[in-house]
Amino acid sequence: MKFLSSSVLLALLALAIPAFATVNVSTPSAGTTVTSPVAYAATATTACATGVGAMGIYVNNKLIYTVSGAKLNTQISLAAGPEHTVVQEWDHCGGSTFTTINLTVQGSGTTATTVNVTANPGSISAGGSSTVTVTASNATQVTLTGSDGTSYSLATTGGSVTVSPSATTTYTADATGSSNNATSSTTVSVAAPGATSPVNHVVFMLQENRTFDNYFGVLNLYRRANGLNTGDDGRVYDVDGIDDKLNLSNKNDEGVTFPLFKLRSTCIDDASSAWLESYGNVNRYNFQSTRPILMDGFVHTAEGLAKSCAASGVCHGAYTDTAGQRAMGYYDQGFLNYYYYMASQFALSDRWFSPIASKSTPNRIATITGGTTQGLVFDPGSDDHLGKRTLPSIFEELDNAKVSWKIYYTVTQGSCIGGTACGSGAGNFPSTTLGYLNFSSKYVYLNPLHAACTGTTRPSSAVGDPSNSLCIDPNHIAPLSTYFTDVANGSLPSFSYIESGSKDDEHPGSTESILTGQSAVAKIMNAFMVSPSWNDSVFFFSYDEGGGPYDHVPPVPGHSNDKTSAALLPIPDISAIAVNPDGYLPCLPPAGTTATSHCDLRPSSPGAHSGDAAATKGFAAQLGFRVPNIVLSPFTRRHYVSHVPMDHTAVMKFVENRFIGGSAHLTARDAAQPNLLDFFDFNAKPWATPPAPPTPVSNNSACTPTNMGP
C-alpha cells in the first residue's frame, strides 16, 4: 500500500472541507407569499482567504441564476404555487454553503396582501414613546399586537400608533387578505432609567462640507473585504452607499453626463449647498411642494459656482472645474484610511443628516440651538448683517442646569491658530458658533480699552493672547490645545464641543487637502482613546453640512428611501424627525431684500413663492444632506450601522437626556430626535480596550485639483 505524505493529505483535506461561510438573504423572507417576479437580495461571507467566488439561485433544485462575487440583487420569475428556492455561495477555497427560501407564489389574476411595520425610534428610555407605523395593501383586516399583550385594530391600509412599553417589546402587524395573509414585526428596545449613566463625558466635533457618499459611499466594499461588517450579534451591517449604484449620474448645463467616479485628488474646487443650491440639488428646476425628487442638480450647482468664480476672479482658490464634474466624485480608503478603519470598527449611521438645507453657519447655529435659526436660512452675519441673536442654546441650557461644558476652538476670527500670539484686537477673538448668540458675552467679549474683566472672565493672555484684547472664561471657551491637556488629565467637562477651522477642517477648496484634516482629527481621536477619559465617554464626530458633493439619499420627507436598495429596506423615512423646530418659518423680508430678525429669503429663494415646498412646509420640507459620521466610545457596538434617521440635534438630545433629564429639549426638532441608544452596549462595553488605528495617509502630493480623475 502506498501512503500519502502528511503534506499531501492536509492539502486534500483543505479541499474537501469548506471554509466557514454564511449566506444572508435579506429578501425574500422564507415562508412568505409573494408575487412574481420575486426580488432576491443576499450577501455571503467566508473564512476562505481569497473570498467568495460566486453566488447563485436554485429553483426546485435547478440552478437558474449566477453572479460573480459576494453579493446578488436580482429578480426571478417563479410559477404560481409553492416554490423551493435556494441561495448558494461558492468560495475560492472549494467550499460552499446555502440558505433555503421556500415561498408561496400568487397565481395570475390575484393580488397579494402585503404588510410592513417600522418603529421610530427603535430604542427609547423608560417612560419614553415610539411611533409604530404599519403600511398594508390589499388587506381586509389589519391588527398590531405587542409581545407585552397590547393590541390595536388598524385601517385596512395600516396606520400609526404611539406606544410606551415599559420593557423591550416586539410589535407584530398581521394583515388578512382574500388570497393570503401577511405578517411583519419590529422591536422597540427600552433602556432602563439611567441607562446612559456610565457616560460622564460627551464630546462632539464637526468638520466641514462633505456628504456621506462623497466620503463613505463605498465603505461597504472596505468593510466586507476586511471582515468588518458583522457585529458581535452575528448580524451583517451594511451602509446605504453607492457601491451598488455607481451608474448614477448628473448632467451639466451643456448636456454632458457625468457618472460617479473615484477622485484622485485630495483637494478639489468648492461647491455649495446653501439654501438655493440645496433645493436645486434635489431638483434643479423645481422648488414646489409637488416637485419630483430627482437628485439631479449637483453638477449644475458646482458648474455654476465655478463659472461665476472664474469670471469674477474673487473666489478663494483656483476654480478649474467649470464643467461641474467634481460633484460626482467620491473617495475610498486609499486616502481616507483612518476614517474607513474607525467607521468600520466602531459605529456610524447612514441616516445622519444636517438639520437645515443650507450652508455651514445656519447648520452650526441650528445644531447648538436644537434646530432653530428662528426663520433665517442665510448666515446672519456675513449674509444678513444682523447682530448677535437671542436664541436658546445647549450651552445656556447646561449652564442653567449647573452642568459643565467647554468649547474648544481651533482658530480665531483673524484665522490665527487658537492659543498663539497672532494678530490683534478682534482678530484674536475665538471663532465659535456661540459667538453668534447674545449668551456668548457672558464668557467672551472684546475689551479694547483693557477694563477689568467681569464675572468669571479673565484677560485673554490666559488663552495665549498677550495683547489682552478680550475677556474670556477659559473654563468654558479655550483653544484646542487645552483639549489635549484636559483629555490627558481626565478633566473633560460633561459636554465638550470642538470647533474646527482653517485648513484642518476638510472644507473643499482647491488648496485644501482632506489629508490634513484627517490627520488633525486622528490626533484628536487618538488622544481620546489612550486617555483616562476613554473609560466613561462618548465622542460623536460628523460634518456640519453636505457642501455640494453628490449624495443619493433624498433629504425629503416621504422620499428618503426612494433610491435605497431593496436589500436594505425597511428603513424608517425621515418624516418623524423633519419637523419645524418652532413657529418661525422661512420668509421674505417685508421691505425688499434687507434681512430682518426672522426673515431673509431673497425673491429667487425656495420658499419665496406660495407653491414652494419651503413655503408650505417650512423647515420640515427638506433637511440638509446626509453627512459622514463616527460614534467613538468604549460602549459603541462593534461594526454597527444605524439606519435610524437623525440630524445633529440628536446629539444635543443625547446630552440633555444624560445630564438634564428625559423631558429636556430646546425645540420641537431636538425633541423629535432618536435617543441614539442603538449605537451602544452599556453592559458588555465592547471597546473597553480600543483598537490600534492606522497612521493616516499623508500623500499631500495628491493635492492636484486639475487632475481629479476619473
Image (spheres, rainbow, N blue to C red):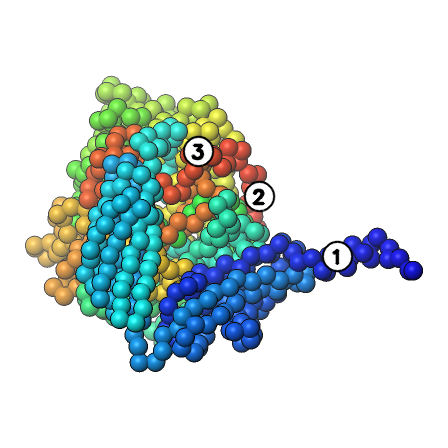
In this rendering, would 636 be left or right of 354? right
**Within the image, what quadrant is residue 291 found in?**
bottom left
Point out residue 326 in the picture as x, y percentages from the top left corner: 43, 63
The first of marks 1 and 2 along the sequence is 1
**Amino acid beneath label 1:** Leu
Point out residue 531 in the picture as x, y percentages from the top left corner: 49, 28
**Within the image, what quadrant is residue 118 found in?**
bottom left
Q: Residue at x 26, y 24 (%)?
A: 402
* Residue on which the image places disc 3: 683
Give the Cα separation between the discs numbered 1 and 3: 41 Å
Up-down: is 538 above or below 504? Answer: above
**Amino acid beneath label 2:** Pro
Give the Cα separation between the discs numbered 3 and 2: 28 Å
- The label shown at residue 13 is 1
Name the residue at the right extreme. 1
Is residue 276 visible from the viewing direction of this image? no
Q: How many residues crowd mark 2 within 10 Å: few (<14), some (14–19), many (20+)?
A: few
Q: Nearer the viewer, residue 193 or 386?
A: 193
Up-down: is 710 above or below 427? Answer: below
The first of marks 1 and 3 along the sequence is 1
Q: Secondary structure at mark 3?
A: loop
Q: Secondary structure at mark 1?
A: helix
* Residue on which the image places disc 2: 694
Q: Nearer the viewer, residue 325 or 70?
A: 70
Give the Cα separation between the discs numbered 1 and 2: 36 Å
